[in-house]
Image: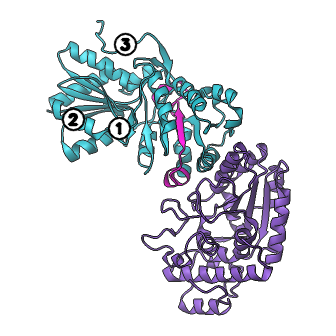
Chain colours: A purple, B cyan
Amino acid sequence: MEKQSIEQLQKVATQLRRDVLRMVHAVQSGHPGAPLGCAEFFVALYFDQLHHNPDFKMDGKGEDLFFLSNGHLSAGWYSVLARSGYFPVEELVTFRKLNSRLQGHPATHEHLPGIRVASGSLGQGLSVAIGVAEAKKIDKDEHLVYVMMGDGELQEGQVWEAAMYAAHHKMDNIIATIDYNGQQIDGPVSKILDLKNLRAKWEAFGWEVNEIKEGNDMKSVLEGLETAKSLAGKGKPVMNLLYTQMGYGVDFMVGTHKWHGSPPNDEQLANALGQLEETLGDY
Amino acid sequence: MSLDLKFTYTEKKDTRSGFGDGFLEAGRKNPNVVGLCADLIGSLKMGDFQKEFPERFFQTGIAEANMIGLSAGLALGGKIPFAGTFANFATGRVYDQIRQSVAYSNKNVKICASHAGLTLGEDGATHQILEDLGMMKMLPHMTVINPCDYNQTKAATLAIAEYEGPVYLRFGRPSWPIFTPKDQKFEIGKAWKMIDGADVSIFATGHLVWEAVVAEAMLRAEGISAEVINIHTIKPLDEEAILESVKKTGCAVSAEEHQINGGLGDSIAQVLSRHNPAPLEYVGVNDSFGESGTPTQLLEKYGLNAENIVKAAKAALARK
């Protein structure tokens, strides 16, 4: 894929936001908030950072891989996969409908290109990513394995089993990212079960921590991911703390957990779409 | 009274050693075979593989959930992971990880579970899982195998390395008679009729296949002809073999080191009720936890030994 300018990438991110809103609105279910907040990350990753092949092969040998552990961001992931050529953009219309490959949470059962393992039950993606990173080490494949988790997801114990393992086994081909939006379904993470000092936690577990403070600014995300890449291969797994705002891009959705798992109604959709220019053509 | 056994043994060995030896051989045959273990390498007999292929073996520490996730990742990257721990920690503790990352995602992961059932012995009920077969057989895509002795466990281990798809392989701790042939061919999903009989069918799995062999001799001494069928694969179940046998005998006994609820017997009952309703008696643990004791004491106390199979066979016969 040819390198695109920041402006071009931002246009893709805006379209991704429109896709997400239209998808969850159409079935009146799904999770719009977090994928709106991760639009810049998804686009920076798939349109700039990853060495990947949309002509999908499950084993992913010879390419960078991405896993979405917080599978409820599926609408955003499906959009970026379609927009980067994994499957037809028109297929987004089937999201969460019967007989679709675009399940509510990502799954391999229906063979959707780009998905390598089911996710949605939280806390499992980091382990899977480390497993395939081990396979890459055996195969002397120097490509990287990316994985995203939610901040609320870090309340799952398995994440910390995996964190310990990755550092102990020097999995320096892993670049993990936490969607650090401070919200979970029942409210602010700090009120539900506070994560306290995340940088200190991951550093104490033996990870290299890279903070990306402006997670909804394309330039900042690109630079942050470049920094993460430069930290890889040095004996430690890398953790990006990606500061995002849930619901970013729509004024009445931003910064609250209220749109974590609720779709907009007709009027709200029209209002939201009015704030997001159709840049690549709606599906 | 000395019994005229149709199968005999000269040596006893634990089935987990059959796994360990099969695993090493599978590793020599196929460079994609890799191993994982959650701090029980010695107990699982995975040490020889680890020594020979250190770069293909992953010690995960006491973190089974992570081990299952790692296995799914290794599998999708083209490896054939054998993940080993005690049966309790390999199933109940990580059910959701197996369900989502392995079964639903259809990953080529081999879950290798030792110390299953009561015959784990003195460690007691915290470790004596009796629900694992039920949990695993309920998962779509999952193949469930419970071999009966050292030789069969070794053969099964080699067979699952060549099979593509998730497998639950269950074996145990105690030293147990080796009564099946060395270097046998193991066919997943194909029941093995070990002893022909006419009056009652005994469908046994795991360690209780030996108890069924003993029970057959005891029944024969009383003039009852029992057919013994080794159901090493709980899922997919060899329905044809079950129906063919019961068509002849007209009644059956299931025998397993597992809860009656959800075990092999339940699977057999489904087959019979659909195709040939016939009396079926269950030898298994009846809705209780185990306790500390020797394997022999526990099999006796919980009603799982040859004497109990004989009793069940007579009860089934009486209902014909």
Q: Which residue is mark 1?
A: B264
Q: Residue furthest left?
A: B320
Chain holding disc 3 = B
Point out residue B192 in the picture as x, y percentages from the top left corner: 33, 29
Asked if residue A165 shows in the view, the reply is yes
Q: Are marks 1 and 3 on the same chain?
A: yes
In space, the residues marked 3 and 2 are separated at their CA atoms by 26 Å
**Which residues are the magenta region?**
B99-126
Chain holding disc 2 = B
Point out residue A50 in the picture as x, y percentages from the top left corner: 73, 64
Question: Would residue B105 be counted in the magenta stretch?
Answer: yes
The amino acid pointed to by label 2 is: Glu
Q: Which residue is mark 2?
A: B244
The local crowd at label 1, few if under 14, some if 14 to 19, many if 20 or more residues have their Cα within 10 Å, is many
The amino acid pointed to by label 1 is: Leu
The local crowd at label 3, few if under 14, some if 14 to 19, many if 20 or more residues have their Cα within 10 Å, is some
| Quadrant into which the C terminus of chain A falls | bottom right
Q: Is residue B213 left or right of residue A112?
A: left
| Residue at x 39%, y 36% (from the top left corner) | B233
In space, the residues marked 1 and 3 are separated at their CA atoms by 25 Å
- Whether residue B174 is situated above or below residue A213 in the rendered picture: above
Disc nearest the viewer among 3 and 2: 2
Disc nearest the viewer among 2 and 1: 2
Question: Would residue B68 be counted in the magenta stretch?
Answer: no
Q: Which residue is mark 3?
A: B8
| Quadrant into which the N terminus of chain A falls | bottom right
Comes first in the chain, label 3 or label 2: 3
What is the count of numbered marks? 3
